[in-house]
Amino acid sequence: MLEINTKAKGVSRFAKDELTEAELLANFAKDVLINAKALITHSTVILHFFNLHRVFYIYAGKLLKNGFLTINMKGALNG
């Protein structure tokens, strides 16, 4: 009877260890998920930032082209 009880305690400890390991894995997965969400948010912010810069550069490019056209037209009128 004592031997069976000892084996049962051993199995119980093993099950407890497995449960703890599963909990640790679940927490790790949760952390990874949180990190992934943070990365997605971070990359979305960076993407918005680059899109704004792209829009700004396109706008600046158009202004620059318009400026060159204006300069060329003035040159043509004076020429």
Image (cartoon, rainbow, N blue to C red):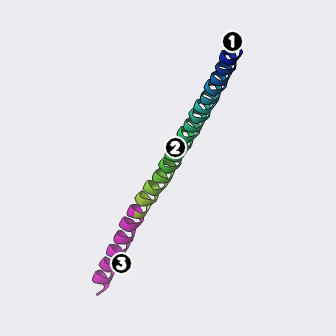
Above-or-below relation of 29 to 54: above
Q: What numbered label is drawn on residue 77?
A: none
**Residue bearing mark 3:** 71
Residue furthest right in the image: 2
Magenta stretch prevailing secondary structure: helix
- For marks 2 and 1, the one nearer the N-term is 1
The residue located at (41%, 60%) in the rendering is 54
Above-or-below relation of 55 to 31: below
- Residue 43 in the image: x percent, y percent? 49, 50
Q: Is residue 65 left or right of residue 40?
A: left
Mark in front: 2 vs 3:
2
Instruction: Measure the alpha-carbon separation of dots 2 and 1.
Output: 52 Å
Q: In the figure, residue 79 lies in which quadrant? A: bottom left
Front residue of this view, candidates 35 and 59: 35
- Residue 17 in the image: x percent, y percent? 64, 29
Instruction: Measure the alpha-carbon separation of dots 3 and 1.
Output: 103 Å
- Asked if labels 1 and 3 touch by Cβ distance under 8 angstroms, the answer is no
Mark in front: 2 vs 1:
1
Instruction: Measure the alpha-carbon separation of dots 2 and 3.
Output: 51 Å
Q: What numbered label is drawn on residue 36?
A: 2
Which secondary structure, mark 3?
Answer: helix
The verdict on residue 53 being magenta is no
- For marks 2 and 3, the one nearer the N-term is 2
Which secondary structure, mark 1?
Answer: loop
- Asked if labels 3 and 2 touch by Cβ distance under 8 angstroms, the answer is no
* Start-end of magenta stretch: 58-79
| Quadrant, the N terminus | top right
The residue located at (58%, 31%) in the rendering is 22
**Residue bearing mark 1:** 1
Amino acid carrying label 2: it is Ala
Amino acid carrying label 1: it is Met
- Residue 5 in the image: x percent, y percent? 68, 16
